[in-house]
Amino acid sequence: MKLICEKEKLLLGLNHVIRSSVGRTTNPILEGVLITLKNNEVTLTTNDLEIGMEYVIKNVEIVEEGKTVVDSKMFSDIIRKLPDTDITISINNKNLLLIECEDSQYKLSTMNADDFPTLPTINVEKSISLPQKTFKDMIKRTSFAVSMDENRPVFTGCLLDVKKNSLNMVAIDGFRLAQRVAPVFSDSEDFKAIVPGKYLNEVSKNLMEINDHIKIGISKNQALFEISDCKIVTRLLEGDFLDYNKVIPSDKETRITISKSDLQGAIERASIFSISSQEKEKKYPIKLNINLDNVIISCTSQIGDAKEEVNINTEGKELEIGFNPKYLLDTLKAIEDDEVCLDFGSNISPCVIRPITDEKFTYMVLPMRL
Amino acid sequence: MKLICEKEKLLLGLNHVIRSSVGRTTNPILEGVLITLKNNEVTLTTNDLEIGMEYVIKNVEIVEEGKTVVDSKMFSDIIRKLPDTDITISINNKNLLLIECEDSQYKLSTMNADDFPTLPTINVEKSISLPQKTFKDMIKRTSFAVSMDENRPVFTGCLLDVKKNSLNMVAIDGFRLAQRVAPVFSDSEDFKAIVPGKYLNEVSKNLMEINDHIKIGISKNQALFEISDCKIVTRLLEGDFLDYNKVIPSDKETRITISKSDLQGAIERASIFSISSQEKEKKYPIKLNINLDNVIISCTSQIGDAKEEVNINTEGKELEIGFNPKYLLDTLKAIEDDEVCLDFGSNISPCVIRPITDEKFTYMVLPMRL
């Protein structure tokens, strides 16, 4: 095998298929990248059996077709550091990958391409498509809320709930919920699928801020994401996702509207005392005292206390309620609008947060007992 | 006590006296900042008994004089996050520090100012002064080479060797040496002092790129650094520093001159294989094959090998020699000139590296056996 390719083109392809944090496996081939040269195209494939990614670099000068596998991190490290010019890649007579560029020459041990687990053929049963930038935004605004608790694997994923021509993406971790809805093109019947949150973030890396579509296909236990020259296959999580519509309260006792940036700034400051330096494990709640025209945000710990006042518009009852500041802050950071509306029931029922002019998003945070 | 001060002015002062990484002590007052209000000045002092720093903020509106101690990290975190406007600081009737700013109010528990270890009075026996920017540059170009090995404490410091009107700053860690010399003003006799490298980096943070002088005073076991509104006291390291003049070889068998950036780039790339992913502990040397008009830089590990060629100008013998690439790279990064000259003896004697047009710097790196 032998090819000649510009460094930037090769590096771009590698960036598409190489995961930033690869979990170390015991099988080196799962940390490898399969390089396939055929028909003036270089196909780069990685697959750790949980997530597989493939990217096709087109219009490359293929001198001799062939394929091989090398350590993906080492290979991309070398390509990244080489000068910005043409790179020649070939196999030498000792079966080493030879990388040549100006006055640099690298040899990398190879693995047998026949041992590489190529991407499975997905028997797509249902599929949707939507603009790349929309799906990227949906991931950004929901995936932060997935659970990190591997003991309840189903909540480490985001639910993709497709009904007619609408996709609802939902993440929930037992303390909070994030939801964003968007219209999609769909030829198939309604479906639900749960995709691991960390793999959605890998998909997101491959999405651009453009209107070109991503196509999402679902089989019995796998999802296939097709994005122009890139293909990603991930497993799906099995199990019952929470019936999220039932947990979002529809009635409220108190509604406040508030400037998002004022609220965020006040909570960020007040939460200085939430985790005090002397007691790393203990988390103090922040307290919201909702009055008719202001909210007092406070936090008291052993080493001091914070009090912040923000102007608001209140409909309904006054209320005193406590929260873990991290959950409120994560949510506010995921909202771009400048005004938000918070609905409360009692001081033990969840708070529903929505941008004031945007019905696409719904966030919910459970309170902490004071 | 009570003062009113602009946020930026207060934060600037705090940044001068608060160390980025404070070692946790068992005595909370050593992690505190002493705030002293007197004569329209705020004096901020930190002291962990190893290094003490003091900064005076002038022309502040002092409503009531007084002093107190609060946790330095917590206090600076609060000030940093407050809006960019006037801040009022006072003590309330529960002896808490009250920080008020617009709609924010913070209370912080205080410690007894009388228990705070104020900066020791240094009985300055010898002193020098030099431009701040020169001393900052000396620290940058030498302190990276101090030893991290606390078993030989004397080498965790930089030697300040003053002879007549010249300061030689030297760091050495058993594998390499870095030296920079500069003219200084001196009224006292010649002296030597060893200052811990990590504290010199704290001093450096307080130095600006200006010609205004820093004054360095030395007592029996302490150093005092005076920089405009700031004062830093550190302990000195005791023990005999290596006679560095004796270890730098004066004769050479081979001299090469080479483009610094070409050499640095080639070593950076070749060292990809020096630490392979599969054997974290094992360090492979990089090998330099010095020929008459080029140097071949290579590295071979279990997973592959790298070969780089760089044009050079050689005087003397050809040579094959091995190095730990980290030491060569650290040194090259500390040099700003574009051409460097490397002097070699045998393949087991140290390599001396100097910028080609600048006699202020001398670096030395020991080879690794191949």
Image (tube, coloured by chain):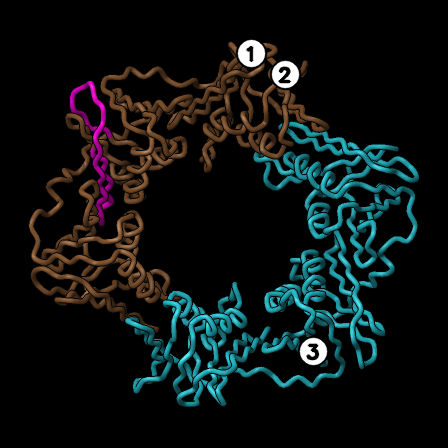
Chain colours: A cyan, B brown
Residue A126 forms part of the magenta stretch: no
| Residue carrying label 1 | B66
Q: Position of residue A9 (x, y in %)?
A: 47, 73
Q: Residue at x 61, y 83 (%)?
A: A120
Mark 3 vs 1: CB contact within 8 A? no
Residue at the image position 68 percent from the left and 14 percent from the top: B93
Q: Are marks 3 and 2 in contact (CB under 8 Å)?
A: no
Amino acid carrying label 3: it is Asn
Question: On the picture, is A150 further left or further right than A352?
Answer: left
SS category of the residue bearing label 3: loop
Point out the stretch of residues depicted in magenta.
Answer: B168-193
Q: Which residue is mark 3?
A: A221
- Magenta stretch, main secondary structure, is strand
Question: Residue B17, position in %: x, y?
Answer: 46, 28
How packed mark 2 is, by other alpha carbons closer than 10 Å (few <14, some 14-19, many 20 or more), is some
Left or right? Give the position of A153 relative to A355.
left
**Discs 3 and 1 carry the same chain letter:** no
Q: Amino acid at mark 1?
A: Gly
- Does A84 sit above or below residue B122? below
Q: In front of the other: label 3 or label 2?
A: 2
Quadrant assignment for the N terminus of chain A: bottom left
Direction from residue B266 to residue A9 in the image, left or right = right
Q: CA distance from mark 3 to mark 2?
A: 63 Å
Whether residue B356 sits left or right of residue B47 in the image: it is left
- The amino acid type of the residue labelled 2 equals Ile
Image mark for residue B91: 2
Q: CA distance from mark 3 to mark 1?
A: 70 Å
Categorize mark 3 by other alpha carbons within 10 Å: few (<14), some (14-19), many (20+).
Answer: some
